[in-house]
């Protein structure tokens, strides 16, 4: 018989043993399958996330509507006027558009089958639910339209997106503004596509994220196929008794692991499909996906289907390499030999050797070698799994005196330190990777997060109101809004030397003396005064244009844009004002007018801008202000001032990390629980014997807790060391200073410890059920 045929025959026998070996075989196969299945589900999810995010981007591009070209398209039968009325509600973005079709062939937005009439809107399911709920009361005041339809999936980037299209009218008069445009199609505009590749540092972040998220899954799968190892070895000894040699026995054991892995593939596919249907309920960092978006790559799915069973067999054979299986027993029951350290150090040292040549590369010095980055990171993190069993064994060998529960736990760890380390391996790898990632993110964050010039002590919001609403009304209504401490309103516009197509222009602002002092330094001021800002960036231009007796024009007209041009003869005696940054950090120039100095009719071409100072003790102060702004002008632009501005690509990568980390953490906890239950099941007779001899249940429960706490403490200590080392190397690779955010390191280790302790608490009820006298029964 050929070697391949013998392998197939022995593996097939192991599969039959797993499924035809009675209740014991089925329980072990099921536990293995659940552990493997959870890992397979996460692998399938990971292979599906890139396609899901790609589908989100594709749908987002398909509904693009603003070109920001500055040109007004001529009216035609296939044109549509669209206005951006997007807003924000309690931290969530609400995408809003007003639609006014100008012909029978006007384009419909994706996901919408008809245009809403004036006073009506077509809303996303999530927005409709919010508006009908009690928590949407404030938003209903801002969006006072009647829902007459639903935006379908092609028009939404995610199931939890808040979006609507409402009917508009009279939008043509607003085409000069940046929030209203005339379009003839939906989709990406020519010249607007951003095909710039990601810079090397962002690519490095993505590679490290995938390694850090996927490696713990592989570790858990490798641990799951070794469930029930001690009982399996006793069955293998019986197999030797009937004539099998040692190699055949190991192949049969591989067949049993293969059976659990194959069943795990089936369960994992089921877990993935069930989780995919629940995807609409999950929202992480404003990201949600439709179930149909989560389609794993066929090639990657086939790779998982082949790699998982193959890994199950190989891991089992590797685990039995040092086990002598004899007809009368397994030599593993004696004290195992001390683990050797030298070869375990080769993995992390090899990882460092692969990463070191790339120190100093990055944006200025070329791309990182992808294979060296992935291989080096994997070797360093896998080094945690090889070093941890040695560390646990070395430490518990020196632990002796203590309480009864402590001694029971220590003795158990001394006899089976490998099993304890396997349980902690996955969480240790995850924590080590998380620490390294946190260090890398913190080190490069400054390159992708810039501080703004906003002065949040003076204002926290700005409101732009269009139309001919009097400045005093804007200031008064916003100032009287609940949660608003102070409103400082200015009217803004431009002045030119000609009424049409001026070659030179300067900016101007209108406001009371107190409000003008927010944007300039005035020595004295009373109504009727006019000021020219000197000493600023625009001082030269204003000096040339502002000459006594000359004529300037408010709101001069430009090609394709409406205007309300008013002539103004420059008077003598214009006062000087020094520059001052406004609350947004902008230092303006040009002219400042008090209301009494403004010529008649000039208000029509101005835009009102209001700086709002909010009361932090009012939870919904920002939303109250947005409601007032919407009443004043449905097209009002409201901006929340922030102290920093973050790169969109960097934010997207970090959001993706949070999505993946959330999924990994959930499945890590579930896998740990299965592992803990399997270990308790193997100790059923031992626990029952101890109870029968009078050992208190409290003592046994504490011993189980110590058996978990000691390995996890050692695992987290090792994970912190490896994570800090990997993080330092990655920072050196991108040319950043090596700094450690100890609060983040403690947070990562605390999360890891919290997951393990939570799993241990959940395993206490089954533990109490196992500590019964009927556990001594045998067949």
Image (cartoon, rainbow, N blue to C red):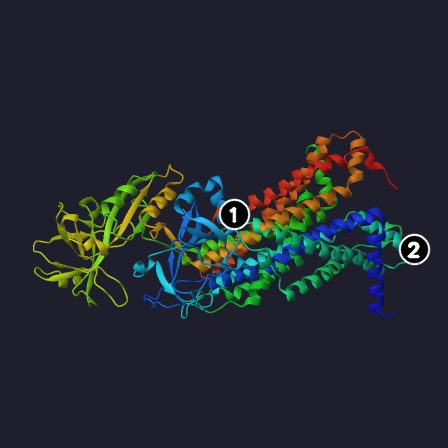
- Residue 668 visible in this rendered orientation of the protein: yes
Picture coordinates of residue 691, whole percent (x, y): 78, 32
Q: Residues within 10 Å of mark 2 (few under 14, many from 20)?
A: few
| Observer-nearest of 177 and 46 | 177
| Observer-nearest of 157 and 648 | 157
Which residue in the rendered view is the most extreme toward the right? 242
Residue under circle 2? 242
Picture coordinates of residue 394, whole percent (x, y): 67, 47
Q: Secondary structure at mark 1?
A: helix
From the viewer's perspective, is 519 left or right of 287?
A: left
Determine which of the numbered discs, if any, sits on residue 147 in the image. Answer: none
**Quarter the N terminus occupies:** bottom right
Q: Secondary structure at mark 2?
A: loop
Quadrant hosting residue 216: bottom right
Q: Residues within 10 Å of mark 1 (few under 14, many from 20)?
A: many
Picture coordinates of residue 779, whole percent (x, y): 88, 42
Picture coordinates of residue 57, whole percent (x, y): 50, 61
In the image, is residue 146 above or below residue 103?
above
- Residue 249 visible in this rendered orientation of the protein: no
Mark 2 and mark 1 residues within 8 Å of each other at the beta carbon: no
From the viewer's perspective, is 303 left or right of 659?
A: right
Determine which of the numbered discs, if any, sits on residue 745 in the image. Answer: 1
| Observer-nearest of 714 and 40 | 40
From the viewer's perspective, is 141 left or right of 742?
A: left
Ranked by sequence position, the earlier of labels 2 and 1 is 2
| Observer-nearest of 412 and 767 | 767
Cα–Cα span, label 2 and label 1: 55 Å
Count of numbered labels shown in the rendering: 2
Image point (23%, 47%), residue name: 471
């Amino acid at each position: 018989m050929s070697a391949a045929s013998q392998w197939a025959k022995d593996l097939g026998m192991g599969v039959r043993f797993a499924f035809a070996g009675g209740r014991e075989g089925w329980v072990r196969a099921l536990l293995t399958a659940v552990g493997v299945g959870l890992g397979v589900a996460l692998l399938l999810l990971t292979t599906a996330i890139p396609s899901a995010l790609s589908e989100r981007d594709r749908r987002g591009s398909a509904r693009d509507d603003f070109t920001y070209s500055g040109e007004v398209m001529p009216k035609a039968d296939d044109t549509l006027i669209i206005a951006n009325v997007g807003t924000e509600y309690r931290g969530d973005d609400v995408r809003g558009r007003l639609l006014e079709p100008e012909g029978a062939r006007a384009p419909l937005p994706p996901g919408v089958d008809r245009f809403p009439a004036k006073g009506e809107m077509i809303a996303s399911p999530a927005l409709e639910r919010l508006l009908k709920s009690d928590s949407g009361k404030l938003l209903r005041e801002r969006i006072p339209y009647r829902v007459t339809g639903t935006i379908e999936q092609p028009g939404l980037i995610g199931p939890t997106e808040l979006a609507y299209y409402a009917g508009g009218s009279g939008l043509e008069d607003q085409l000069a503004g940046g929030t209203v445009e005339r379009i003839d199609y939906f989709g990406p505009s020519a010249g607007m596509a951003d095909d710039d590749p990601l810079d090397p540092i962002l690519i490095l972040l993505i590679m490290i994220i995938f390694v850090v998220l996927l490696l713990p899954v592989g570790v858990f799968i490798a641990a799951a196929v070794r469930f029930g190892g001690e009982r399996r070895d006793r069955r293998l000894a019986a197999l030797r008794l009937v004539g099998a040699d040692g190699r055949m026995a190991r192949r049969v054991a591989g067949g049993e692991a293969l059976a659990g892995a194959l069943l795990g593939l089936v369960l994992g596919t089921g877990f993935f499909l069930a989780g995919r249907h629940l995807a609409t309920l999950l929202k992480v960092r404003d990201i949600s996906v439709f179930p149909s978006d989560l389609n794993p790559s066929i090639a990657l799915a086939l790779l998982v289907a082949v790699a998982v069973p193959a890994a199950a067999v190989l891991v089992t054979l590797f685990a039995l390499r040092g086990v002598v299986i004899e007809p009368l027993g397994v030599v593993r029951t004696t004290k195992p030999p001390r683990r050797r350290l030298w070869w375990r150090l080769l993995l992390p040292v090899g990882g460092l050797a692969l990463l070191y040549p790339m120190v100093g590369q990055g944006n200025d010095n070329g791309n990182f070698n992808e294979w060296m980055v992935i291989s080096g990171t994997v070797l360093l993190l896998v080094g945690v799994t090889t070093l941890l069993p040695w560390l646990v064994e070395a430490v518990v060998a020196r632990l002796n005196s203590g309480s009864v529960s402590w001694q029971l736990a220590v003795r158990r760890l001394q006899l089976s330190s490998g099993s304890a380390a396997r349980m902690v391996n996955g969480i240790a790898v995850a924590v080590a990777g998380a620490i390294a990632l946190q260090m890398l993110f913190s080190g490069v964050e400054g390159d992708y997060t810039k501080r703004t010039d906003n002065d949040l002590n003076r204002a926290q919001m700005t409101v732009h109101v269009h139309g001919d609403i009097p400045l005093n009304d804007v200031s008064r209504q916003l100032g009287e809004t609940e949660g608003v401490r102070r409103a400082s309103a200015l009217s803004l516009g431009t002045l030119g030397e000609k009424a049409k197509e001026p070659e030179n222009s300067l900016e101007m602002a209108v406001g009371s003396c107190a409000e003008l002092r927010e944007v300039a330094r005035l020595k004295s001021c009373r109504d009727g005064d006019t000021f020219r800002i000197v000493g600023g960036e625009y001082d030269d231009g204003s000096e040339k244009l502002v000459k006594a007796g000359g004529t300037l024009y408010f709101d001069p007209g430009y090609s394709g844009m409406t205007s309300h041009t008013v002539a103004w003869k420059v008077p003598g005696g214009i006062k000087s004002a020094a520059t001052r940054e406004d609350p947004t950090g902008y230092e303006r120039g040009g002219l400042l007018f008090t209301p009494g100095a403004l010529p008649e009719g000039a208000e029509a071409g101005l835009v009102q801008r209001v700086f709002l100072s909010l009361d932090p003790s009012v939870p919904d102060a920002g939303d109250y202000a947005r409601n007032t702004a919407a009443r004043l002008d449905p097209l009002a632009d409201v901006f929340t001032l922030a102290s920093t501005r973050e790169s969109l690509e960097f934010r997207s990568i970090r959001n993706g990390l949070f999505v993946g980390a959330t999924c990994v953490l959930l499945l890590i906890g579930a896998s740990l629980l299965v592992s803990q239950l399997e270990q308790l099941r193997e100790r059923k007779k031992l626990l029952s014997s101890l109870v029968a001899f009078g050992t208190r249940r409290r003592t046994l429960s504490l011993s189980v807790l110590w058996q978990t706490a000691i390995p996890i403490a050692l695992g987290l200590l090792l994970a912190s060391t490896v994570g800090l080392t990997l993080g330092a190397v990655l920072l050196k690779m991108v040319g950043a200073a090596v700094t450690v955010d100890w609060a983040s390191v403690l947070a990562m280790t605390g999360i890891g410890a919290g997951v393990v302790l939570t799993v241990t608490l959940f395993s206490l009820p089954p533990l109490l059920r196992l500590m019964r006298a009927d556990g001594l029964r045998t067949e």
